[in-house]
């Protein structure tokens, strides 16, 4: 299959490019390196020493004989080039990772909020528009997020669609399937809820074939392919904006920092290991929707954990201290989360769950590169709520 990967230099996109290449797919990736630029802007860098993209690609060719083509392109701002590229390559599948993905960064300041909305919505809109204008019948696989649903509310979260019973125009009760009501908790998550509407429209109006993968928090760093050589190593974000919770706890334990639990740690989230991410994408592109099918939505997660329980697990393994810090986010201090993930399990996903040996592997990686950690950048400080007196009173009541 010809596969175009948008955002192929990122944490999920790079291992996906290697995984699909090793499966025999003809892979081209596009990236504008904005993630590396944001690291420069924030004055942080991946804990692992990620190579420049051209070195990564040359190493892959040296080691496997396989070529991955790459284009430096801004999917949100270079529409004409994107359309011409899709026309020229005529991909069978397009995997879309090319969005600003940090919730804390998206709440950091006005510029980051506006950038996140403009970048993410324009990127998704441009891909969809280019698919229609070129007439290329590719299958679009998009990385969405579990956060579109708002983490629970006491319901078992279905895979995208909710069956509701409503009155019809004759007053009789009737059942309808609707998109699960969106309930985003950050500007970033809000862009993913808006992506869903773009997919709904382009699928209904233009018949585009789309799979939206509502992914949980990804943990781990290496996959089978990125482990082959240090030049292929995957990024490991640990800073207060881009580091995600379990990887942060594991690296914090490795460098002797307290584990930074926000609030009581009662927040429950869905998780998936990076090896399962790449496998899920392989399965999604291998099982494209039929012509005329509505947008497929899969919940791409394998287990749920309370943040505080994760901290206790890491503390038990390593002897690290747990610090319950004031929560910079506006989020429920505690929630239950029950998620239906039958679609990917039915396609053959064999979940990689939290196991000591995998957790230890991440601690080993973190210890190996601990000298690259800037401990002053560990705490998460991007504020969800600005000091507006009337609003603060409303929240308090
Ligand atoms: P990442 O930031 O590491 O990778 C995204 C890549 O896209 C980066 O290399 C960036 O340079 C590129 N990019 C961004 N905007 C672009 C643009 N306009 N044009 C071209 N390239 C652009 O993020 P990630 O962790 O790999 O996440 C990938 C996708 O998966 C995101 O859409 C994210 O929302 C989703 N996701 C990630 C996680 C997670 O825990 N990492 C969990 C759920 C969903
Ligand atoms: N948390 C802590 N301590 C920390 C970091 C985080 O207690 O040091 C808490 C947060 O307050 C939050 C939870 O852990 O309650 C998860 O935070 P996170 O940073 O691991 O994940 P999140 O901001 O939700 O975003 C990540 C990815 C995003 C993806 C999302 C999937 O960055 O791209 O969409 O996970 S999900 O959470 O399922 O929506």
Image (cartoon, grey):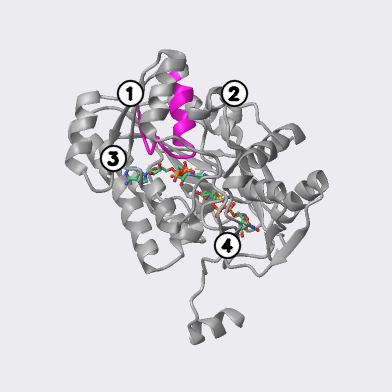
Other-residue count near label 3 (Cα within 10 Å), few / some / many at <14 / 14–19 / ≥20: many
Residue at 51% x, 66% y is: 382
Other-residue count near label 2 (Cα within 10 Å), few / some / many at <14 / 14–19 / ≥20: few
Name the residue beneath numbered marker 2.
Answer: 348
Quadrant (top left, top right, bottom left, bottom right) of the C terminus: bottom right
Name the residue beneath numbered marker 4.
Answer: 380
Residue at 24% x, 48% y is: 77
In the rendered view, does 175 fall on the left or right side of 263? left
Q: Which disc number belongs to residue 127?
A: 3
Give how far apart the Cα atoms at labels 1 and 2 are.
22 Å
* Mark sitting earlier along the chain (1/2): 1
Magenta-colored stretch includes residue 237:
no
Disc 1 + disc 2, Cβ < 8 Å: no
Position in image of residue 205 (x %, y %)? 27, 41
The residue segment tinted magenta is: 4-21
Instruction: Select label 1 or label 4 by which is in front.
Output: 4
Name the residue beneath numbered marker 1.
Answer: 92
Other-residue count near label 1 (Cα within 10 Å), few / some / many at <14 / 14–19 / ≥20: some
Helix, strand or loop at label 2? It is: loop
* Mark sitting earlier along the chain (3/1): 1
Q: Tell me if the residue at label 4 has its CB under 8 Å from ligand 2.
A: yes
Q: Which disc number belongs to residue 313?
A: none
Position in image of residue 16 (x %, y %)? 47, 29
Relative height, residue 344 to residue 339 (above, below)? above
Helix, strand or loop at label 1? It is: loop
């Amino acid at each position: 299959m010809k596969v175009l990967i948008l955002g192929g230099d990122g944490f999920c996109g790079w291992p996906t490019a290697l995984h699909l290449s090793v499966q025999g797919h003809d892979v081209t990736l596009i990236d504008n390196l904005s993630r590396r630029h944001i690291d420069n802007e924030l004055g942080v860098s991946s804990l692992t020493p990620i190579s420049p993209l051209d070195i990564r690609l040359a190493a892959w060719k040296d080691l496997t004989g396989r070529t991955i083509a790459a284009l430096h392109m801004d999917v949100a701002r270079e529409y004409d080039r994107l359309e011409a590229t899709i026309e020229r390559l005529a991909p069978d599948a397009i995997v879309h990772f090319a969005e600003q993905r940090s919730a804390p960064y998206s709440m950091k300041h006005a510029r980051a909020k506006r950038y996140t909305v403009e970048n993410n919505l324009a990127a998704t809109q441009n891909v969809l528009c280019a698919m229609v204008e070129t007439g290329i019948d590719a299958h679009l696989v998009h990385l969405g997020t579990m956060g579109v649903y708002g983490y629970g509310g006491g319901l078992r979260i279905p895979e995208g669609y909710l069956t509701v019973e409503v009155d019809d125009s004759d007053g009789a009760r009737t059942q309808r399937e609707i998109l699960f009501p969106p309930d985003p908790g950050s500007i970033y998550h809000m862009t993913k809820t808006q992506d869903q509407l773009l997919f709904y429209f382009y699928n209904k109006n233009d018949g585009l074939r789309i799979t939206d993968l509502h992914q949980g928090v990804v943990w781990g760093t290496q996959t089978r392919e990125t482990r082959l050589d240090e030049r292929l190593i995957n990024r490991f974000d640990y800073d207060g904006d881009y580091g995600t919770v379990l990887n942060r706890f594991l690296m914090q334990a490795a460098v002797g920092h307290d584990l930074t639990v926000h609030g009581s740690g009662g927040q429950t989230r869905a998780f998936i290991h990076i090896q399962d991410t790449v496998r899920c994408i392989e399965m999604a592109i291998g099982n494209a929707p039929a012509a005329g099918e509505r947008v497929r939505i899969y919940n791409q997660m394998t287990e749920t954990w309370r943040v505080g329980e994760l901290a206790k697990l890491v503390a038990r393994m390593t002897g690290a201290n747990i610090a319950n810090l004031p929560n910079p986010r506006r989020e429920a201090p505690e929630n239950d989360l029950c998620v239906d993930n039958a679609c990917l399990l039915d396609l053959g996903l064999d979940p990689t769950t939290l196991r000591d040996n995998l957790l230890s592997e991440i601690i080993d990686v973190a210890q190996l590169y601990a000298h690259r950690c800037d401990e002053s950048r560990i705490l998460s400080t991007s504020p969800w709520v600005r000091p507006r007196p009337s609003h603060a009173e409303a929240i308090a009541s």
